């Protein structure tokens, strides 16, 4: 199995399960996210985790190709930048959070996007990558 397929199998089901959890337990996750953004330690360590995940993805899968596999690379770079931003500029993230969560529909929208996107990654992994 190539790295694209392995990463799609890891990321895809994770997105589906997290997206469904957000949609099924909206209030619980809304409260959890609000507490998370108000806890500097949680916020910092999530930045470290995102940074490590992003580095792991881009060091094993930095493919800039014209097919679905580039999405895995973009996810890796996005995780790296998100992690670095959370560590270097924590107040900026809190301002973005405050803006995005003026309406709680943002959390629901993220769940609605995660589920089909995760299923799409699983479908590509199931089909052996197709590239």
Image: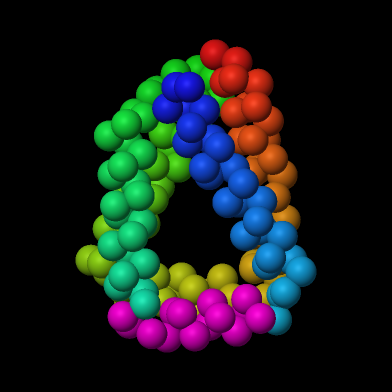
In the picture shown, does residue 12 fall above or below 44?
Answer: above
The structure residue drawn at horizontal position 36% and vertical position 67%, both measured from the top left corner, is: 46
Left or right position of 4 against 42? right
8 or 101, nearer to the observer: 8
Residue 124 at x, y percent in the picture: 63, 27
Residue 50 at x, y percent in the picture: 36, 57
Does residue 100 appear in this view? Answer: yes
The structure residue drawn at horizontal position 37% and vertical position 77%, both measured from the top left corner, is: 42
Q: In the current view of this chain or complex, which residue is farthest to the right?
A: 24
Q: In the current view of this chain or complex, which residue is farthest to the left?
A: 88
In the picture shown, does residue 35 fall above or below 73?
Answer: below
Q: Which residues are magenta?
A: 28-41
Left or right position of 21 against 37? right
Q: Is residue 95 magenta?
A: no
Chief secondary structure of the magenta portion = helix
The structure residue drawn at horizontal position 42% and vertical position 86%, both measured from the top left corner, is: 38
Does residue 103 appear in this view? Answer: no
Q: In the current view of this chain or complex, which residue is farthest to the top?
A: 131
- Colouring of the image: rainbow
105 or 111, nearer to the observer: 111
Please identify the quadrant where the C terminus is shown: top right
Residue 37 at x, y percent in the picture: 44, 79
Q: Quadrant of residue 94?
A: bottom left
The structure residue drawn at horizontal position 36% and vertical position 74%, both measured from the top left corner, is: 43
Residue 25 at x, y percent in the picture: 72, 74
Left or right position of 68 against 24? left
């Amino acid at each position: 199995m190539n790295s694209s397929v392995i990463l799609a199998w890891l990321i895809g089901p994770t997105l589906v399960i997290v997206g469904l959890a957000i949609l099924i337990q909206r209030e619980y996750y809304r409260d959890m996210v609000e507490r998370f953004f108000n806890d500097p330690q949680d916020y910092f360590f999530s930045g470290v985790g995102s940074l490590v995940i992003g580095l792991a993805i881009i060091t094993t899968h930095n493919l800039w190709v014209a097919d679905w596999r580039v999405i895995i690379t973009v996810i890796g770079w996005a995780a790296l930048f998100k992690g670095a931003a959370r560590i270097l500029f924590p107040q900026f993230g809190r301002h973005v959070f405050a803006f995005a969560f003026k309406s709680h529909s943002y959390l629901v929208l993220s769940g609605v996007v995660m589920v089909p996107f995760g299923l799409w990654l699983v479908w590509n992994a199931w089909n052996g990558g197709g590239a």
